[in-house]
Amino acid sequence: MYVTGAIPGLLWLRPKLHYPFGKPDKKGPLLVLANHHTLIDPILVQMAFPFRRLNSIATKDLFDTPAKARFFTWMHCIKIDKDNFAISSFHQIVDRLKEKKLVLIFPEGGVQLQGDNEIQAFKSGVVLMAHRSGAPVIPLYIAKKQKWYHRQHIVMGQAVDVKQLLGNIPTVDAIASVSKVLREKEIELRTYYENRG
């Protein structure tokens, strides 16, 4: 999923990017955390980073046939088992970040279909991934469209240095605290979008 994959989406979804706190640096290793309410969310995130190759996590169900496994591997997806997250998946994500790649994770743990637009608690593993790799975290809020023909809005926050917040040897309590901070950043982006003039 790269520049060519973003062009059809640009024509159909007409995404509008909002930077309430200024544009973050989009170069180098980045761990992007986004809310997740539709199956096309990875495409929307790719459009927010049109000149970067997106590496995205994908559930093991998407790899259940040889053809699908080849396709999603070609799309630079990282296979995970949500019910039994393997340490190998953790290392694969960290390795890609150390290779200065862009990795997308949905920290709520899956597609959230509830209608109240609530952002669920973040999985603490994303904090450890950012800490281990040293990659900055960029929160991203994807607004839910009321009608299919409405323009898509994406709100991007500033980068968060997780390693600076945690120190060299993070405690369980500190990890949980930073996880809450990242969720609050996401909520802040949602609030900006809902209250924009």
Image (cartoon, rainbow, N blue to C red):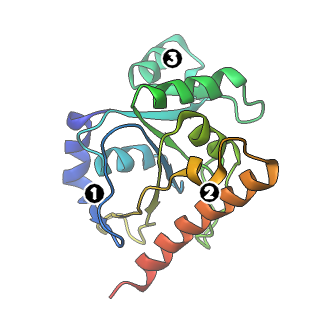
Q: In the image, 40: left or right of 117?
A: left
Between marks 1 and 3, how big is the CA–CA gap? Answer: 27 Å
Disc 2 designates what residue? Answer: 112
Residue 50 position in % (x across, y down): 25, 44
- Whether tag 1 and tag 2 are in contact, CB under 8 A, the answer is no
Between residue 3 and residue 60, name the one nearer to us. Answer: 3
Q: Quadrant of residue 18?
A: bottom left
Q: Residues within 10 Å of mark 3 (few under 14, many from 20)?
A: some
Q: In the image, 11: left or right of 178?
A: left
Q: What element does badge 2 sit on?
A: loop
Q: In the image, 134: left or right of 49?
A: right
Q: Is residue 36 above or below residue 132?
A: below
- Whether tag 2 and tag 3 are in contact, CB under 8 A, the answer is no
Disc 3 designates what residue? Answer: 69
* Outermost residue to the right: 172
* Outermost residue to the bottom: 197
Which amino acid type corresponds to the residue marked 3 in the rendered image? Ala
Q: Residues within 10 Å of mark 1 (few under 14, many from 20)?
A: some
What residue is shown at x 29% (from left), y 61% (from top)? 23
Residue 117 position in % (x across, y down): 58, 70
Q: Give the mark count.
A: 3
Q: Quadrant of residue 22?
A: bottom left
Q: Which quadrant, please, contains the N terminus?
A: top left
Disc 1 designates what residue? Answer: 13
What residue is shown at x 56% (from left), y 21% (from top)? 63
- Whether tag 1 and tag 3 are in contact, CB under 8 A, the answer is no
